[in-house]
Amino acid sequence: MTILIDSPDSNNKSLQPKGWLRYFSFSLDHKVIGIQYLVCGFLFYLIGGTLASAIRIELASPISDFMPRDVYNQVLTLHGTIMIFLWIVPVVNGAFGNYLIPFYVGARDMAFPRLNAVAFWLIPPSGLMLVASYFVEGAAQAGWTAYPPLSITTPQSGQIIWIMSVLLLGGSSIFGGINFIATIIKLRRPGLKLMQLPMYCWAMLGTSLLVVLSTPVLAGTLILLSFDIVAHTGFFNPVLGGNVVVYQHLFWFYSHPAVYIMVLPAFGLVSEILPVHSRKPLFGYTTMVFSIMGIVVLGLVVWAHHMFTSGTPPWMRLFFTIATAFIAVPTGIKFFNWVATLWGGKISINSAMLFSCGFIINFVFGGITGVALAQVPFDIHVHDTYFVVAHFHYIVYGGTVFIIFSSIYHWFPKVTGKLMSEKLGILHFAITFIGFNLCFAPQHWLGLNGMPRRVAEYDPQFQFVNQISSIGALLMAISTIPFLLNIFLSIKKGKDSGDNPWNALTPEWLTSSPPPVENWEGDAPLVEEPYGYGKPISQENLIKKT
Amino acid sequence: MTTLNSSKEIKKDDSELNEHHEDFRMFGLITFLIADGMTFAGFFAAYLTYKAVNPLPDGAIYELELPIPTLNTILLLVSSATFHKAGKALLKNKNSDTQKWLIITALLGITFLICQLFEYFNLPFGLIDNLFASTFYALTGFHGLHVTLGTLMILIIYWQTRPKEGRITSQNMFPLEAVELYWHFVDGIWVILFIILYLL
């Protein structure tokens, strides 16, 4: 008779399904949960992308011929909500955070594995609810912002399902945030100091603070909004003495930090990718940390710059303009640091690096238009026009989605042990980059000339530029083909990558690829210099095993 | 301000890292309570804004009687003390004392809820009468939901601290400590709510 000596925890894990089936189980393994987040998010990205294509087809002609006006509004609402709450937030936080953070802090799993699994499994049902809300009578058509009185006067059953779904997704996000804070603060391996953590940990710590502090406010707001719809209270209904501007304040108190929730993790990820592929230490580690925390603090006090046309008093306009302009300082510091990291480095031009450089270019552009939008006179001119649409997509698509792709190319060998095809990767980058800029750069011009957003019809003089934009959108849709092809071909017949194909020094590469169930065969290595590239000491000296 | 507070919280816990490596459940709970507190903060902010900028229509009734909520404040404050007693007793392995204090706490919670309902039924306004009424019911109702959940959890704790068979002992204090912290949090919120809603 053999006696299995096993801790109760690992015993638990051996009961879980093996192979691909484990991705459909209530797995407690942070790596499995990370992949679950990523694949689930990508499926919703395909749905949201299909909706975006429908929007661009409609906008190829100035009259509403492809779909009726109310369907157009429903489609854009669903597109926005899916892309934000089911693709970007879960993937850039949940997927990469769950996969990488335990490696980075030298742990075997997250601090609360069960809560982690619960947080993920809230997403598929609420995502399906959100999609289903489109098919009931009165689908949500007030945009992802759900501004009253529009959201409480249009037909409402779909709006209520929409609210419930966003509440559940917010809950998932809060659970995830609590887990990340506890993991980064409490679960670090002994001897690992905070200032030795890879930058993504800092980005996730900042992001999670924002999630924990601001998401509950959105939850409370949506509860009040649902009261307005179901019980006919008057919180946000001016007819009953309510105040729509209060909704806007509470909503943007979450939704401006939400922009940082979407983009700070991308800042962290690009800080991991650039040093590896340019073989140089990350420039200005300490300033990076302080600028992340600066963005967190400032990010909480700039929300009213979305509301300059909502009758905000002059002092408020002044305060929020200045606070918003200040955010450019820490963000600018980060950009100069990334450029300085690249400067003089031994740069390898591969898919991950190309997408990261694409990110820097796009995000600088989105950042500049962001500072412009913070100025009241300019903002009043372009408020609710395509200029805002262009700015926003330069941040979340040109910024975050580029980094998501970059990260997939960078960490694919880690997850599968296979290399991805560089040819297809570069093709993917080229189509995405050209398509993205072709789609959104002309929209700045459209907005400056007064084309309003969220309307199915427009002045015929804008048709030519809109058609250019639609061609760009078509290219973006096509760009998923080489990407998916690359993923499937590489999983099937990709070359073996070995454990550390990039010769990276961050902790996740110091174990086998794909990693064992509990991350390390022995103890977790103590990585004191995760960015110690190009120094005259060998890798072994940098990693002390204890 | 809240950001500063929470990061201080984290720093404090950070220094204790090496002594209590195991117990980060309490840390997770504190983070959750900060999040929960932000929900209330949102409601309070909405209420105060309404009060400042949205005048009620003529003839709207918004008078509140003070005796019941004052009694309720006292009930909750006393229940915080009795819960604390329960924890102290468990530390000394006096499970029956713990159970006694817990049942008193639960009864105080239930009395609070009954008083709250009594107040609801005797108020001259309903949920949708005016903006003040809606906000009043939303705030007290959301808080009452917290008290209800807390009372249920106290009853579960009561069951689990029964002598000999119970799961919660002086070695396994966490469930009791967690509910206790939550209960103090709910009490604290009530005090703020009482000041803002009834006294201001």
Image (tube, coloured by chain):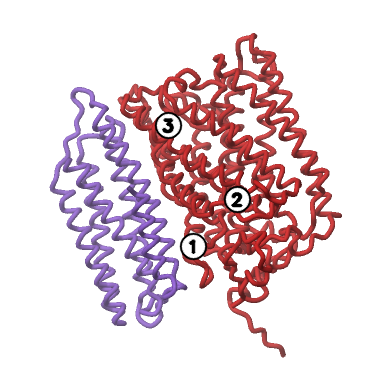
Chain colours: A red, B purple
Q: State the image quarter where residue A307 is shown.
A: top left
SS for dot 3 = helix
User: How many numbered discs sit on the rendered protein?
Assistant: 3
Label annotation for residue A98: none
- Decide: is B67 above or below B78: above
Q: Which of the two labelled residues, at mark 3 and mark 2, occupies the earlier sequence position?
A: 3
Q: Would you name the residue on which mark 2 appears?
A: A271
- Count residues near mark 3 (Cα–Cα under 10 Å), then give few for <14, some for 14-19, many for 20+: many
**Residue beneath the point at 65% across and 54% down:** A280
Asked which secondary structure carries label 1, the reply is helix
Q: x and y percent of residue A167 in the render?
A: 48, 43
* Closer to the camera in the image, B96 or A471: A471
Tell me which label, 2 or 1, sits earlier in the chain.
1
Which of the two residues, A300 or A251, is positioned nearer the viewer here? A300
- Are there few (<14), some (14-19), or many (20+) residues within 10 Å of tag 1? few
Tell me the amino acid under the disc marked 1: Leu
Tell me the element at label 2: helix
Query: Cβ–Cβ below 8 Å for labels 3 and 2?
Result: no
Residue depth check, mark 3 versus mark 1: number of the one nearer the observer: 1
Residue underneath mark 1? A194
